[in-house]
Amino acid sequence: MSERKKKTSIQWGKWALKSTVSYAVFILMGLLLSFVPAGQIDMDERVEFTFILLQPESCRVGKRIIRIRGRFIKETKDVHGISKKGPFSKTLRLPRTFPAEQEQALLRFLQNAMTQVG
């Protein structure tokens, strides 16, 4: 057997051993985790965002969305609690999926708020 073939077969053997050990570790970890009840492994990363409108600047109604430009505070709620950031300028885009009477109430509210500010 030539020197090059020996070197290649040794490299392939090392690779096969490493991959076998990796798969064995992965399978053992899965087996160990199967003994832990699912309720104890809480992987819930749910985060809720709430944008509080402080000062509306403009409002545009498009075919599919309503764009509200203004000053907002961003409130974030997660497993660690509630945090607030802002105020900052932002364009909030709302899809037009709610009933027409709710949409009209929102637009009246925004127009009244803009006339009070301006």
Image (cartoon, rainbow, N blue to C red):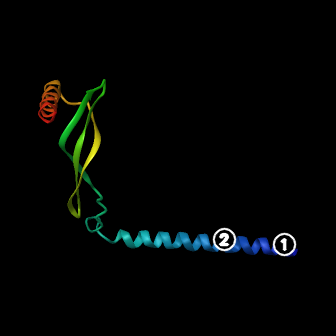
Q: Quadrant of residue 14?
A: bottom right
Considering the image in quadrants, where does the C terminus appear? Answer: top left
Considering the image in quadrants, where does the N terminus appear? Answer: bottom right
Earlier sequence position, callout 2 versus callout 1:
1
Circle 1 SS class: helix
Pointer 1: residues within 10 angstroms few (<14), some, or many (20+)?
A: few
Number of numbered discs on residues: 2
Q: Residue at x 11, y 34 (%)?
A: 116
Q: Residue at x 84, y 72 (%)?
A: 4
Instruction: Return the residue nearer the eye: 54 or 107.
Output: 54
Which residue, given by chain and number where applicable, does mark 2 sit on? 15
Which residue, given by chain and number where applicable, does mark 1 sit on? 4
Question: Residue 90, relative to residue 60: is it above or below?
Answer: below
The amino acid beneath tag 2 is Trp
Instruction: Return the residue nearer the eye: 113 or 48.
Output: 113
Asked whether the viewer can see residue 85, the reply is yes
Residue 81 in picture, x, y percent from top left: 20, 62
Left or right: 66, with 29 as reference point? left
